[in-house]
Structures are given as C-alpha cells and as structure tokens.
Image (cartoon, rainbow, N blue to C red):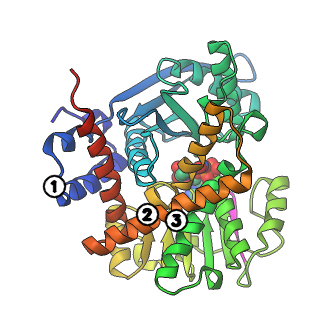
C-alpha cells in the first residue's frame, strides 16, 4: 500500500483497525480494501488572522479532507478545537463516508477543521478566522463538490459566514454551500435538532427490541452543545428522566429529573449548564453515574479501557464521534452494555443536512413537520436494516453498521470502475 503515515493518529489508527476487521469479515475486494484506507484529497492550509488589538497577527493551520468522491459531493462538518490535526480529520472523514452510506445518502465523507481554541476568540476574531479559512478552501468546496456543516466549536453563525464569503467569491447567493445555517438563510430547524433528536429516536427503536421503554429510563448526557442539548430535550419530551448533564464549565444533577426547557433558558443567559438552580452541582464523574442510557455528546476518546469497567449504564448512545476506544468497546460489550455506535446514532446530523441541501439546491420548501417525519423515517428504517444485519451475522451494532456502510461505498467504487 502507498505509505499513509502522514495520516497516522490515534483516531485514524482506530478507524483503520475497525475497518480492517470488517473488511476481512466481508471478504472485501483487496484493491478496494487498500484504496478506502486513504482519502482522495487532503488539503492543508495555513493562514494569518488578526487579533482585535490589531498589532498581533497569528498564523493558524486548517484542513479539509475528502475521503470518497465516487457517490456525489462530499459532506462533513468543520470543527474548531486546539487539537485538530490531519490524522483526526481524516479519520472523521472516513467515518462520514460510512455514515452517509448507512443512511443511503448520495454523499462521500469529508471533514475539516482549524487547530484553534474558539472559546477565547471574540466574535470578530472568529469571523475573521472563518472567512479566511473559507477563502483557503475555495478550490475544493462547492455546492456540487463538498458541503461543510457545523461540528465541535462551530455553529449556525459560522455557517452563515462561510456562506457569505463563498457567495461573494462566486457572485451570487449560494445557500447550498453549507448546511446547519440559520433559518433566515435557508437553514432548517430540523437540521439544528436532527443529531440529538435522531440519536434518541434510534435509541428508542433499539430499546423496543429488548421490550424496554425509553420513557422509563434515567438518562445522562455528557456535553450540552448542539448534540447534547437536543438529545436531552428529546429525552425529556419522551418522558425519560434526564438526571445529569455537563459541559466544560460544570455539571448539574437531579435524581428526579432535570427540567430541560428551564435549563435551556438558563444556558441562553449563562452559556453553561453550571449553576442551574433546578439541580445540585455534579460532583462525581458523569460517565460513571448509575443510569439506563448514557449519551456521550462532547468529544472523542472519553470512554477508554481505564473507565469502561466503571460504566453502569445499560445502553450507550454515541452522540459524539468516536467517544469509545476499541479496547473500551470490547469491555462494554463483555459487560452486556448495548452500544449504539456513532456512525448510526448521530447520522441524524448528515440526514438533516441532506434535506436542507436538497431544499436549497431545488429552491423547494418542505414544512418542518414533514422534514422531521422524513428524518425519523430514514433513521429508524436504517436502524431496522442494521438490526437484521447484526442478527444475521451474530455481531454487534457497530460491526453491522460498518458492514452496511463499507459494502455500499465499495459497491459504488467497483461499479464506476477505474479512471483512466
Ligand atoms: P458543540 O461545540 O456544539 O458542543 C460541545 C459541548 O461539549 C459543549 O457543551 C462543551 O462545553 C462540551 N464539552 C467539551 N468537552 C467536554 C468534556 N471533556 N466534558 C464535558 N463536556 C465537554 O459540539 P457539537 O456540535 O454538539 O458536537 C459534539 C460531538 O458530536 C462531536 O464529537 C461532534 O463531532 C459530534 N457530532 C456533531 C454533529 C452535529 O450535528 N453538530 C453531528 C454528528 C456528530
């Protein structure tokens, strides 16, 4: 194989290890097997941005990786975090390919990011970073080429700046260049809530298989950003008790269940769950709390072989990307914990994005209710397919999801043939 060392990172190595096992299991064509380990395009950019004080100019590094270009445009989020690196972004782009294929979308996987901590940045600084990064990405993004979306540390406003910058270069409004943008620019509320709500819909369908009711569950959510907060809200609306949530600043606990709509009002003012009067400050490790459903919805690599034995949840719903290391995954399965893997659990995000993009490119508007019904239909029917694959192959849901995703991508590549 071509030397892929430039992509090596902990996350990339884990994604490839997972892929190798499944590729072998399904007897994947050896040529395709090697090809899919490497992304088709990986753009690294460095660019300067000016601090508000004006004297200081900082140079930062950013990436956009496109894994497979065979099935349609590529699709994937853009994250701002200090530890963003080429290996991580590549791993996440590969996962996006499987994810889109699992829910049957006409996309290949992509991911991007800037290695910067967005929290200390002023709004103006974040805007300058975003606009310059967008300008650097111009050769590779496009409504029919590659469509970014929000991820860790980016939000609807970030997408609005990307759309504005791109539209200025093109010379006409291009709402379809990003998804997860504000409703005033053609964004959809369904997209905003899709990842968190979708994760709960899939968890509900999975628990039904064991005759367990989601509404009777105690739920714990790590991270209260875009994914975590709507997973918590959907759980609350289902009638489940959300007993603990946290974010980077702190956490809150209430054995009787937190009032999530009230918590939304609190974060609108304070920008953190910390200090919410409807519960007690959380003073123990959130992932190790006694609960039925645990939803890690913050960052990757939080469930490892060091804490997996201490996890008491019955079901883990991976809202975040790669929250569980492979070694931890085995420990959890040995302990009979049901894991709904990221590539299935958080596929609501890319599915909601797809609907938003179709609306934008066709200038067509569905009602939000209709969009939401379509979203849940795609997710639950994909879950049913994965369930059948898992039963047929006597395997866990992660392996079953990978079987479906990898087979579909490989079939597309083989059918198109080799150029030239
Ligand atoms: P976000 O930036 O909106 O929110 C992240 C939240 O996690 C914040 O509340 C932050 O304070 C908290 N957090 C960060 N580190 C933490 C830690 N160590 N402990 C507790 N809380 C912590 O990000 P997001 O868009 O909600 O994404 C969260 C995860 O979900 C990421 O892994 C992302 O890749 C994945 N994901 C997001 C989407 C989406 O639609 N936004 C779709 C699929 C997957």
Secondary structure beneath dot 3 equals helix
The image position of residue 93, as x and y in percent, is 41, 41
Q: Earlier in the sequence, mark 1 or mark 3?
A: 1
Q: Which residues are magenta?
A: 249-253
Quarter of the figure with the N terminus: top left
Mark 1 — residue?
27
Secondary structure beneath dot 1 equals loop
Q: Nearer the viewer, mark 2 or mark 1?
A: 1
Q: Residue at x 72, y 56 (%)?
A: 369
Q: Earlier in the sequence, mark 2 or mark 3?
A: 2
Q: What is the quadrant of residue 225 in the picture? A: bottom right
Mark 2 — residue?
341
Q: Residue at x 58, y 39 (%)?
A: 149
Q: Main secondary structure of the magenta part?
A: strand
Q: Nearer the viewer, mark 1 or mark 3?
A: 3
- Which one is in front, 296 or 29? 29
Residue 75's place in the image compared with 333, above or below, is above
Residue 212 seen from this side: yes
Q: Earlier in the sequence, mark 2 or mark 1?
A: 1
The answer to the question of whether label 2 and label 3 lie on touching residues, with beta carbons closer than 8 A, is no
Residue 166's place in the image compared with 259, above or below, is above
Secondary structure beneath dot 2 equals loop
Residue 405's place in the image compared with 233, above or below, is above
Q: In this image, 25 relative to 133: left or right?
A: left
Q: Residues within 10 Å of mark 1 (few under 14, many from 20)?
A: few
Q: In this image, 385 relative to 370: left or right?
A: left
């Amino acid at each position: 194989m071509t030397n892929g060392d430039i992509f090596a990172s902990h996350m990339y190595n884990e994604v490839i290890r997972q892929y190798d096992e499944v590729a072998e299991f399904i007897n994947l064509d050896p040529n395709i097997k090697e090809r899919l380990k490497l992304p088709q395009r990986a753009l690294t950019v460095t660019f300067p941005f000016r601090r508000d004080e004006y004297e200081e100019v900082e140079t930062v590094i950013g990436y956009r990786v496109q894994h497979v270009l065979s099935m349609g445009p590529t699709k994937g989020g853009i994250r701002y975090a200090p530890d963003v690196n080429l290996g991580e972004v590549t791993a996440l782009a590969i996962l996006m390919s499987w994810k889109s294929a699992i829910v049957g979308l006409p996309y290949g996987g992509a991911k991007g990011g800037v290695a910067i901590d967005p929290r200390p940045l002023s709004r103006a600084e974040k805007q300058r970073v975003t606009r310059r990064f967008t300008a650097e990405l111009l050769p590779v993004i496009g409504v029919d080429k590659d469509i970014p979306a929000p991820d860790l540390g980016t939000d609807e406003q970030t997408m609005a700046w990307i759309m504005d910058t791109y539209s200025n270069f093109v010379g006409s409004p291009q709402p379809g260049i990003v998804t997860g943008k504000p409703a005033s620019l053609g964004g959809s509320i369904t997209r905003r809530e899709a990842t968190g709500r979708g994760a709960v819909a899939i968890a509900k369908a999975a628990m039904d298989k064991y005759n367990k009711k989601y509404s009777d569950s105690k739920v714990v959510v790590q991270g209260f950003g875009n994914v975590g907060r709507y997973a918590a809200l959907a759980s609350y609306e289902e009638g489940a008790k959300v007993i603990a949530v946290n974010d980077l600043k702190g956490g809150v606990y209430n054995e009787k269940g937190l009032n999530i709509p009230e918590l939304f009002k609190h974060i609108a003012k304070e920008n953190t769950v910390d200090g919410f009067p409807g519960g007690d400050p959380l003073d123990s490790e959130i992932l190790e709390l006694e609960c039925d459903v645990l939803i890690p919805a913050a960052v990757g690599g939080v469930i490892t072989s060091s804490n997996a034995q201490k996890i008491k949840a019955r079901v883990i719903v991976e809202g975040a990307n790669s929250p569980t290391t492979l070694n931890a995954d085995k420990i959890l399965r040995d302990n009979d914990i049901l894991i709904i893997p990221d590539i299935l659990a958080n596929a609501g995000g890319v599915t909601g994005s797809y609907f938003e993009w179709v609306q934008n490119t066709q200038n067509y508007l569905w009602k939000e209710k209709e969009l939401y019904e379509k979203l849940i239909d795609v997710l639950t029917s994909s879950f049913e397919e994965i369930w059948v694959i898992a039963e047929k192959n006597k395997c866990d849901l992660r392996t079953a999801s990978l079987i479906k995703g990898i087979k579909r991508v490989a079939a597309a590549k083989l059918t198109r043939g080799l150029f030239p």
